[in-house]
Image (cartoon, rainbow, N blue to C red):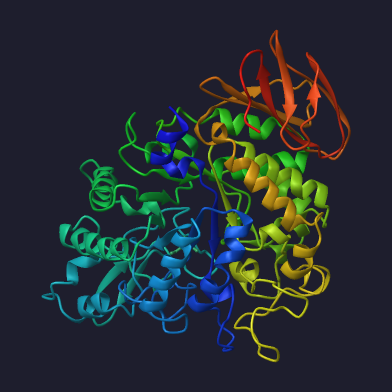
Amino acid sequence: MSVKTSSDLWWKNAVVYCLDVEMFFDSDGDGCGDLLGLTERVDYLAGLGVSVLWLMPFYPSPNRDDGYDITDFYAVDSSMGTLGDFVELVRTCRDRGIRVIVDFVMNHTSDQHPWFQAARSSKDSPYRDFYVWVDEKPPEKPGDLVFPDAETSNWTYDRKAGQYYQHRFYKHQPDLNLANPAVRDELAQVLGFWLEQGLSGFRVDAVPFLIEGVLDDPHQIIRDLRSYVNRRVGEAVLLGEVNLPAEQTRAFLGDEDGDELHMVLDFIGNQALYLSLARGSAEPLTKALSSYPKIPAAASLGRFVRNHDELTLDKLSEEERAEVFARFGPDESLQLYGRGLRRRLPTMLEGDERALRMVYSLAFSLPGTPVLFYGEEIGMAENVDIEGRYAVRAPMQWARDGGFTLPGVSPRRPMVEGAFGPERVNVTDQRRDPGSLLNWFERLIRRRRECPELGFGSLTLLESGAESVFAHRVDWEDATIVCVHELSGSPATVSLPVGDGERLVDLFDHSDHDLPATLQLEPYAARWFRVARTGVRLPP
Ligand code: NOJ
């Protein structure tokens, strides 16, 4: 495959940036970020080098789950702007070489959605079967509650309807009945509508729940979704939220040719990464990454360090989870639902920027598509005084005075305070400092995009000879990249397997190493090398 054809599979060499419009930049001084504000900051994102913008929900919503509770799939919440503003944003992004994808919630609506209101009003309503109703409450299944702090059941009795309705999440989010073809048609129309606004795809919320309860070939729903979306727009992608063991996650990418989701977020690798960091050992990550079956050539894994929810550790064993809690969030107030953490990485690492850079370097060096959450590029932390999962969704820190809204205005959610507050962590200061995290991220992203091997190649885990060093190789056609990352914060010595007539060229400082390479690594070292072979010209 040449670089030319690699553009057809653009998502495999993309760098995604996820943000909440309400928390990014407030242009009109009402305390709430908006589309106009975001549009003003598109050049910031372009400068950083990201190639895909992922917008968290911006649809009209009573906002009881930060917009994941939608009342109208066809509009923009007035607090964030208008559909016109949305189109201007997408157009501006396109002009700066950035594609836009949006969160799409197909699993449920808000209970305020007109479909649900009609459904509960009458058994004869055409919308009744849009939701899942039963007369008798089914027995609860252990582990089925996603938000055990708020709910005690996945079924709630609706007096008006005289029946129980299903909700895998909050009771104000009734589940849509995807087994009903009329529901699937309606949702297809919604997807078609947004694709016509110039989008390049969707982050599909809660994917495994979509096919639950569908008896005949449940994955057909995902196949149909994929073929519909790509009939409408050939380049559009589906990035799925699938937090399941590797084998089951892989199933959502479809057959060998990949006929379901184009990408899934790699929760398994993410959770193992934290266990590896807690132990200072490469072993958990090595084990997790080798548990993935081969993925289709056109598919990709979204590699992320932090997302917008709790940092879930639900796929680790109880003991493993306890280790991560003990190391990164021992206080119960930092934990959530017994399975996750409410912190971002900089505070977990007590502000150690070497360690921080190493973690992102590692995530970006794994074959797959890196996904950033806003603020990671400046080392933003959380505000634990903000309730629950929203602790990590504080307003973006643009300047020493916050810079998110107009002076004197209180943001809809409080900013981070203290050592990681905007006085010390902000875009303006870091822009001016060539050694800042922000400028380092810009270089990292540029490097990552210049290395399509990392998007398209296949992973080989290497025996580094040092427990604390995660070493891997990525091969694509005749190109090879070798990376080493020291996870424990101690010096280490590693030997890298390199063949006759090969040399390693450091991708960040361009020094060559004679081989076989025995490297002395400093604590939290993060190194990427291209393998130079006699007679093969290397890219710059
Ligand atoms: C998954 C989203 O990531 C989360 O934020 C949301 O609360 C649930 N889906 C329900 O929509």
Between 416 and 76, the one nearer to me in the picture: 76
Residue 498 x/y as whole percent: 71, 14
| Quadrant showing the N terminus | top left
Q: Is residue 181 above or below residue 460?
A: below
Asked which quadrant contains residue 534, the reply is top right
Is 38 left, or right, of 413 in this rendering? left
| Quadrant showing the C terminus | top right
Residue 35 x/y as whole percent: 48, 76
Q: Which residue is drawn at 67% across and 80% down?
A: 414
Is 436 left, or right, of 104 in this rendering? right
Between 2 and 417, the one nearer to me in the picture: 2
Any part of residue 60 in sight: no
Residue 257 x/y as whole percent: 32, 31
Count the marks: 0
Between 444 and 183, the one nearer to me in the picture: 444
Residue located farthest toward the top when viewing the structure as drawn: 500
Q: Residue at x 59, y 72 (%)?
A: 24
Residue located farthest toward the left when viewing the structure as drawn: 124
Residue 129 x/y as whole percent: 18, 66
Any part of residue 360 in sight: yes
Q: In this view, does 351 lie above or below 84?
A: above
Asked which quadrant contains residue 111, the reply is bottom left
Is 224 left, or right, of 123 in this rendering? right
Residue located farthest toward the bottom when viewing the structure as drawn: 408
Between 385 and 264, the one nearer to me in the picture: 264
Is 198 left, or right, of 271 in this rendering? left
